[in-house]
Amino acid sequence: MYTNEAIMAFIDRGIYEINKDYLYYLLAGTDWSIGTNKAVMGLTLNKSTLSEKEIPLPDIRIQRAIDQKPDCLEKAISERKKQLGKLDELVKSKLAVKKSLEKLETLKKALMQQYFGQEQ
């Protein structure tokens, strides 16, 4: 049984073969704002509104294939975020080296001016 804190429960009676991850992604990706009611605590869905929703239920093999895709994409997103973090570190390092180089060049110019009265 899958429930929320208010009114809804999904009870698996074994009539249909349902992949729980497919169901999770399906429900997470559904726009539940359609048919909601305004209440003190915000928008709510009631049993009759939820009963009107149709849930597409393809063959179990298709459900499994569909449930794999978000996981693969999530892994790719995670890897890209790691790469972006490393690139940020490189940019910061590059800026620090550039700043250090600029300071050394300024120091060199000052020394050349002091010693020889000219810039090189």
Image: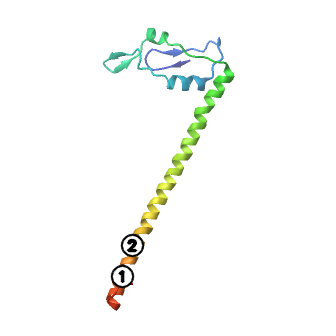
Q: Which mark is residue 16?
A: none
Determine the residue located farthest toward the bottom in the rendered image.
116
Q: Relative to residue 18, is residue 33 drawn left or right?
A: left
| Residue in front for this viewpoint, 55 or 116 | 116
Q: Residue at x 33, y 16 (%)?
A: 38
| Residue in front for this viewpoint, 106 or 43 | 106
Where residue 57 appears, as percent x and y from the top left, is 61, 17
Q: Relative to residue 14, is residue 9 drawn left or right?
A: left
Q: How many marks?
A: 2
In the rendered image, which quarter contains the C terminus?
bottom left
Q: Quadrant of residue 43?
A: top left
Q: Residues within 10 Å of mark 1 (few under 14, many from 20)?
A: some
Q: Amino acid at mark 2?
A: Glu
Where residue 23 appears, as percent x and y from the top left, is 57, 22
Cα distance in 3D space between marks 1 and 2: 11 Å
Q: Amino acid at mark 1?
A: Lys
Relative to 72, residue 108 above or below? below
Residue named by callout 2:
102
Q: Residue at x 60, y 23 (%)?
A: 20
Q: Relative to residue 119, is residue 26 drawn left or right?
A: right
Where residue 104 appears, as percent x and y from the top left, is 40, 77
Q: Quadrant of residue 100?
A: bottom left
Q: Which mark is residue 109?
A: 1
Where residue 119 appears, as percent x and y from the top left, is 36, 84
Relative to 31, residue 99 above or below? below
